[in-house]
């Protein structure tokens, strides 16, 4: 990759202001090779770059070259690629690597990859010696817009997604848009699902912008991507800033996720990408919003069209409606067995509702493949 | 156990004031059966009592009877007893139990047992669905004076003790002194190690009190125990309140622990009790303080005599001095391979020092069995 072509790219920074700690999300091209991306981070003797077998061959050497200017010992670990490996065994490989190298409690962890690498590395940082600093270097659109903000880290459990984890904030997020050049089209679409989400839940004009700019986003136009990533991070930051520990408001970020998690768990992790499940889940949640009388039928049509145009599935896998209900009752938002859905109350405004099993069945039956 | 004999015992409460959250440590006799011990806790549909195979037969039914007045579903889990089981497998049993019962994110965990049960249950609470509330019911002297304050939770790793964990505060600690009646003498002594620690590091007059009241403590006199538990919790709370995340001052609570952890890891968890290793570790750390010229030789004599009188070992297992050094370099207080020891600078005042391998070797050789 020729880095000379972007020696002076523009860099956006979104400041995430939290009660406990604040940090910057750097957004732009060529960030991996810019010295200023890597200055001012916590000092330590040791750094560990956690990546996966897909991303490491593309970018690890460049990151390592930068980190060797700041840390005496730069360790690396390549995990297997995929949601199926977001488990205790992979997490333990991180701990083993750190302990085998006698990495101390100041060691800085760097997550180079998508959401799976970020979630696991962040969780490892949260619990290694009860907490060491970490930096995110998201290389997928989904992780740039989603895992960059909010401090959610986790691993999966055979009985549920993200069931073991922690709220833990990174020191910095370095979102180099050039890394999206190597992203498979399927993963670009999956990332767009989380981008699209921010329109209906928080910003009606962003939904308009997305409809107009979807072709540019799919063509990986850097300016369009930069705006989409920045606006998504800003909206998420505003929501998370009001509710860091997900006591209430923050739940609206899970629009489409209750159905989506059921799809992922029901099919087995790794069958559908997370963003694909969320895309389809938003169709179902939009329909639920219509059936609850909150939104007009045209809203469902509009959402379905946009999600489909983004290259995402709009038909849900046929797991059987009772299996869906069973899986959704396990959702972290559920309380005392009652499923809580994120619904759209007006364009740009979301809320939480429960719904009768009968109504949920209707929604499911209308969209099963 | 006749609970009528203590229907109106005195109850002490030590308030732990922390930036994020505050809670009470209730200290007294008969607490398990008093309604007021259990009121005002977080409301939820489900509670889980985590205990072990030794403690559960003694107290679990009584705790369960109280909790059934407040929670619809009261689950229970008996882990294997001992430090050797403070591992991922046991932690996962807690997660499995919760997920199998579809326990939601409001579920309250109750740790009924000693430090191992408390550390694991606290860590499980810290990471289950990214955090649920928990309550400690410590049934050993060590856990009443040590794990009650500070919010340290963890599991062990084959390469080091407490290597994976979190800082996570309980909602309440219920320290029923009557549970100490069933404690084996060896464990009572182990608990006294952590009590004794608070004298040299923070309160010279408490060291005097301990020397005078050791016979009463060994005879399990309730008044003496109540004072020892309360004073230990107060001192620890004062230190932790100034340094919740162990950035500096809090490290003084690890007096005797650098040597002690090396003993535990070197012998394999479970050979010596944690308090036994700390007791012996304090002898070594006292000697180091003398050899560094900080304290007179009479201090080592005084500490050795008190620790021995408490029924604790004062001779360290012969792992070889180079193995000790290797293990201590893995200690969480170590930085960039340099071991940091807690030493006594004056009676009632501790500090951190590094020491040459040569000096540490001298200390070890003087005390190896």
Image: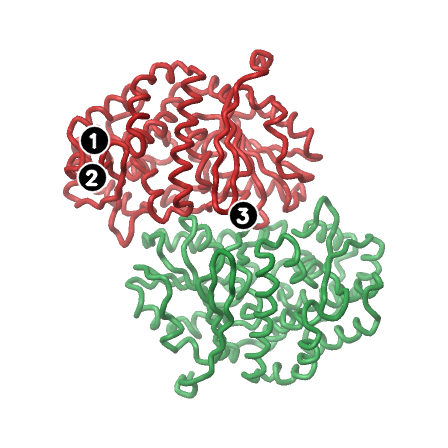
Chain colours: A green, B red
Gap in angstroms between the C-alphas marked 2 and 3: 38 Å
Which secondary structure, mark 1? Answer: loop
Provide residue A219's location: percent of width, then percent of height.
60, 84
The residue depicted at 57 percent of the width and 59 percent of the height is: A84
The residue depicted at 36 percent of the width and 45 percent of the height is: B159
The chain to which mark 1 is attached is B
Q: Quadrant of residue A184?
A: bottom right
The chain to which mark 2 is attached is B
The residue depicted at 64 percent of the width and 34 percent of the height is: B75
Q: Which mark is residue B321?
A: 2
Instruction: Tell me, yes or no, if residue A53 can be seen here.
Output: no
Pointer 3 residue: B127
| For residue A261, side relative to residue A154 (left or right) | right
Provide residue A191's location: percent of width, then percent of height.
60, 71
Sequence-earlier tag: 1 or 3: 3
Question: Image height check: is A89 above or below A71?
Answer: above
Provide residue A188's location: percent of width, then percent of height.
59, 75
* Discs 1, 3 touching: Cβ within 8 Å: no
* Discs 2, 1 touching: Cβ within 8 Å: yes
Q: Categorize mark 1 by other alpha carbons within 10 Å: few (<14), some (14-19), many (20+).
A: some
Q: Quadrant of the N terminus of chain B?
A: top right
Provide residue A312's location: percent of width, then percent of height.
68, 73
Question: Image height check: is B134 above or below B210?
Answer: below
Which secondary structure, mark 3? Answer: helix
Instruction: Tell me, yes or no, if residue B163 can be seen here.
Output: yes
| For residue A202, side relative to residue B191 (left or right) | right
Which marked residue is nearer to the observer: mark 2 or mark 3?
A: 3
Name the residue at the bottom extreme. A5
Gap in angstroms between the C-alphas marked 2 and 1: 9 Å
Q: Are marks 2 and 1 on the same chain?
A: yes
Sequence-earlier tag: 2 or 3: 3
Pointer 1 residue: B368
């Amino acid at each position: 990759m020729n880095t000379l072509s972007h020696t002076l790219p523009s860099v956006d920074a979104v400041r995430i202001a939290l009660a406990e700690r604040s940090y910057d999300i750097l957004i732009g091209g060529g960030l991996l090779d810019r010295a200023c991306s890597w200055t001012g981070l916590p000092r330590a003797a040791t750094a560990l770059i956690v990546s996966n077998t897909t991303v490491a061959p593309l970018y690890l050497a460049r990151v390592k070259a930068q980190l060797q200017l700041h840390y005496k010992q730069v360790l690396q670990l390549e995990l297997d690629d995929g949601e199926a490996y977001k488990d205790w065994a992979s997490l333990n490989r991180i701990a083993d690597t750190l302990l085998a190298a006698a990495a101390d409690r100041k060691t800085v962890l760097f997550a180079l990859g998508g959401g799976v690498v970020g979630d696991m590395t962040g969780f490892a940082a949260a619990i290694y010696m009860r907490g060491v600093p970490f930096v995110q270097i998201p290389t997928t659109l989904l992780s740039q817009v989603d895992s960059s903000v909010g401090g959610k880290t986790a691993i999966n459990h055979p009985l549920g997604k993200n069931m073991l984890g922690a709220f833990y904030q990174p020191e910095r997020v370095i979102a180099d848009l050039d890394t999206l050049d190597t992203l498979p089209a399927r993963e670009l679409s999956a990332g767009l699902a989380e981008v699209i989400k921010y329109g209906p839940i928080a910003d009606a004009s962003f939904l308009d912008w997305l409809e107009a700019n979807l072709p540019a986003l799919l063509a990986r136009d850097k300016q369009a991507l930069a705006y989409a990533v920045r606006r998504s991070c800003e909206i998420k930051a505003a929501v998370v800033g009001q509710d860091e520990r997900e006591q209430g408001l923050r739940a609206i970020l899970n629009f489409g996720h209750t159905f989506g998690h059921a799809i992922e768990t029901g099919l087995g992790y790794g069958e559908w990408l997370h963003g694909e499940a969320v895309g389809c889940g938003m169709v179902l949640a939009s329909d639920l919003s219509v059936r609850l009388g909150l939104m007009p039928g045209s809203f469902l049509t509009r959402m379905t069209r946009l999600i489909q145009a983004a290259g995402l599935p709009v038909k849900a896998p046929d797991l059987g409606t009772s299996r869906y209900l069973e899986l959704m009752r396990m959702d972290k938002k559920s309380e005392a067995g009652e499923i809580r859905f994120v619904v759209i109350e007006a364009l740009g405004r979301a809320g939480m509702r429960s719904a009768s099993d009968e109504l949920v069945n209707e929604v499911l039956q209308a969209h099963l493949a």
